[in-house]
Amino acid sequence: MTIDLHMHSTCSDGTFTPTELAREAKAAGLTHVALTDHDTVEGVAEARAEAHRQGIAFLSGLEISAEYQPGTMHILGYGFDETSAPLLERLASVQRWRDERNPRIVEKLNHLGVALTLPEVEAVSGGGLVGRPHFAKVLMDKGYVKTRQEAFDRFLAKGGPAYVDKARLSPEESVALIRAAGGVAVLAHPLQLQAEDDDTLDAILGGLADAGLQGLECHYRNHTPEDTRRFLALAKGFGLLVTGGSDFHGTNRPGIRLGIGEGGLNVPMGCWEGLVGRGLGN
Ligand code: AMP
Ligand code: ZN
Ligand code: FE
Ligand code: FE
């Protein structure tokens, strides 16, 4: 039994289509998976169909980028009804915010002397939503930068010369939206919050738990055993379910593999059982 509850397809910024991803999962020996694209559930039905064809257990998923300073707060949802109208409507607003932002990034880059058009960026996105990783790919393909990281460091990172902020859902609404669609809400990769100390993290988790958060992603691609122990203790303290996954993005993030992340990931079966114990799964 090998589990991975965090992966991205071409519907957001991964490089495999949902169908290809389910086949990759099979090839990697996975038995239980969830697709967690950023701010979209477009790939869920397709991934589920192929996962089931491959004999893999599947949970619907998504990863919402919530409003938060100074780091990054991503809220994962699992096992919701991906046809839920309120969920789809709100995700459509999030998509509009993104669509408004992308031409402004193009404009900024053009002003900086980078010759690049929106259709060129859309072309590398694989047909799903268009985000900064796709801009990074085009910057690299055109020779403006040598690596994706350089594209972020020089242009696209928060505060960078081509950075454009976008409206986001609040953490509270993100949690409520997932739960209203029948899902379980989980805080992703807590290290990315960049909480300065344990007390800060405690306060953030306490606030989210009050808002209805039900789980914490304790097992993650780059966690040290010490990180994992720390987050497991926090999950226990707040009565949260434990989840985990690789955050696989295909060739957009070389070095991250399904199931094992950067090599040391090993998501326990109990994570799946915890989610399914809440009445989810198929
Ligand atoms: P977007 O949703 O368009 O704002 O893009 C967010 C994605 O860009 C994240 O999921 C990361 O993959 C990537 N990203 C954001 N900031 C950085 C950074 N400083 N360095 C490298 N990648 C980044
Ligand atoms: Zn991503
Ligand atoms: Fe994330
Ligand atoms: Fe992710």
Image: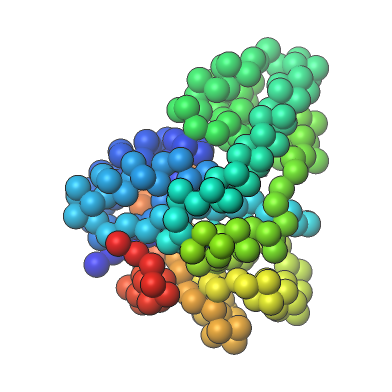
Residue 89, how many percent across, how many down?
60, 44
The total number of labels drawn is: 0
In the foreground, 265 or 77: 77
Residue 234 appears anywhere in the view: yes
Q: Residue furthest bottom?
A: 237
Q: Residue at x 56, y 17 (%)?
A: 120
23 lies above or below 116: below
Residue 34, how many percent across, how many down?
39, 56
Q: Residue at x 76, y 25 (%)?
A: 104
Q: Residue at x 75, y 77 (%)?
A: 203
Residue 17, how many percent across, how many down?
37, 36
In the foreground, 100 or 246: 100
Residue 146 appears anywhere in the view: no
Q: Quadrant of the N terminus?
A: bottom left
103 lies above or below 50: above
269 lies above or below 89: below
Hey, which quadrant is residue 142 in on the image? top right
Query: What colouring method underlies this structural image?
Result: rainbow
